[in-house]
Amino acid sequence: MRTASGQAAASGSSSTGRRSLIDPIALMQIKNLTLRAKTVVDGFTAGLHRSPLRGFSVEFAEYRPYVLGDDPRSLDWKLLARTDRYYVKQFEDETNRRCYLAIDQSKSMEYGTQGYTKSEYARTLAATIAYYLSLQRDAVGVMTCGTAKSEFLPPRHRTGHLQHLMRILELESTGIHSDLAQSLEQLAGLSRRRGMVVIISDLLTEPDSLLQPLGYLRGRGHDVLVIRILDRSEIDLSIKASSMLQDLESGQEMYVDPTLARSLYRQRFDTHEAQLLEICHRRKARLLTVTVDQPLETVLLEMLGAASSVSAKQAMARSAAVSGSKPLATTSKPPTTTAQKAKE
């Protein structure tokens, strides 16, 4: 196994003491998907995370007004004595997080110039995320998107579940045309309990088509993270000579002169990317763009950081909604809680 710098990765750290990164080209030589995921995760120093979901744990999160049906044991009796109002304590849940992996298996994902395709990279990334979260005792599920028949495995954490999930990821893609929006709408209907949804796709679809399904997912209370997988040549249009190009989904062929087409292609690429960013911003989802030559450890680190950022923002928004205050644009000053108002 070679690292990105060309040095042998024997112990997972270089002579300088920094963690080595596994070259994706070398990683893809491992045929077994589970072993690929284990190789990445074993070289990744992971920290514990906390879910934004609420339950009966040890760390206080916020107050909210008591409503009929709440457990009386959660009432703050001291606050009741001071304010003559009923408030319920909410706590951060340090138990399992639910994660739904939505992976695009449409024909456009079969493109690749690195010796492997976007689909192989995406499946390896999904397997790595699933393996890592399983080690954290989190419930992980998967749904294949953009295929003639979507496969759905609900999030669970039990013996044999990870192996079942890996088998679904290893299935040959039967997708032709991208129909990501329909699959995400289906996922919104199947995901009855809120959690984190990680969408892995090249997003080669009309951006406006994602507005409604992302809205459905957010309406279910999910934190949504979109990981956009691209080959480097798709960004730069790195075609050296005039060529006949074929659309993987429609089969249509087109003659392309890169000298003449590069400027217009780049303009349309930037417009498409800006539209995707706008859609994700409107739906309060996080968008990460990843190229297939990027080591998966760095992607996993970025994903965890993005998930933590989204969770923190959503928790702040829920806290502001309960307390009746407006959400803050920055996190430099914590929002005023109901308890603080009550004390005043």
Image (spheres, rainbow, N blue to C red):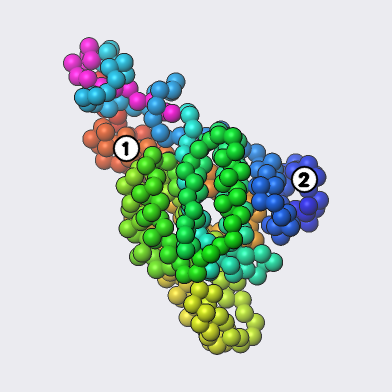
Q: Amino acid at mark 1?
A: Arg
The image shows residue 84, relative to residue 293, as above or below, that is above
- The residue that appears at 32% across and 22% down in the rendered structure is 89
Mark nearer the viewer, 2 or 1: 1
Residue 236 in the image, given as x and y percentages of width and height? 57, 73
* Between discs 2 and 1, the one toward the N terminus: 2
- The residue that appears at 53% across and 84% down in the rendered structure is 253
- The residue that appears at 32% across and 19% down in the rendered structure is 74
Q: Is residue 229 left or right of residue 282?
A: right
Q: Callout 2: helix, strand or loop?
A: loop
The residue at which mark 2 appears reads as 14
- The residue that appears at 36% across and 37% down in the rendered structure is 316
| Residue 276 is inside the magenta segment | no
Asked if residue 214 can be seen in this view, the reply is yes
Residue 128 in the image, given as x and y percentages of width and height? 61, 47
Q: Amino acid at mark 2?
A: Ser
| Residue 85 is inside the magenta segment | yes
Residue 26 in the image, given as x and y percentages of width and height? 74, 57
The image shows residue 249, relative to residue 181, as above or below, that is below
The residue at which mark 1 appears reads as 318
For the magenta stretch, what is the residue range? 80-93
Mark-to-mark CA distance, 2 and 1: 43 Å
Depth check: give the residue in front, 157 or 333: 157
Crowd band around label 2 with a 10 angstrom C-alpha radius: few (<14), some (14–19), many (20+):
some
Crowd band around label 1 with a 10 angstrom C-alpha radius: few (<14), some (14–19), many (20+):
few
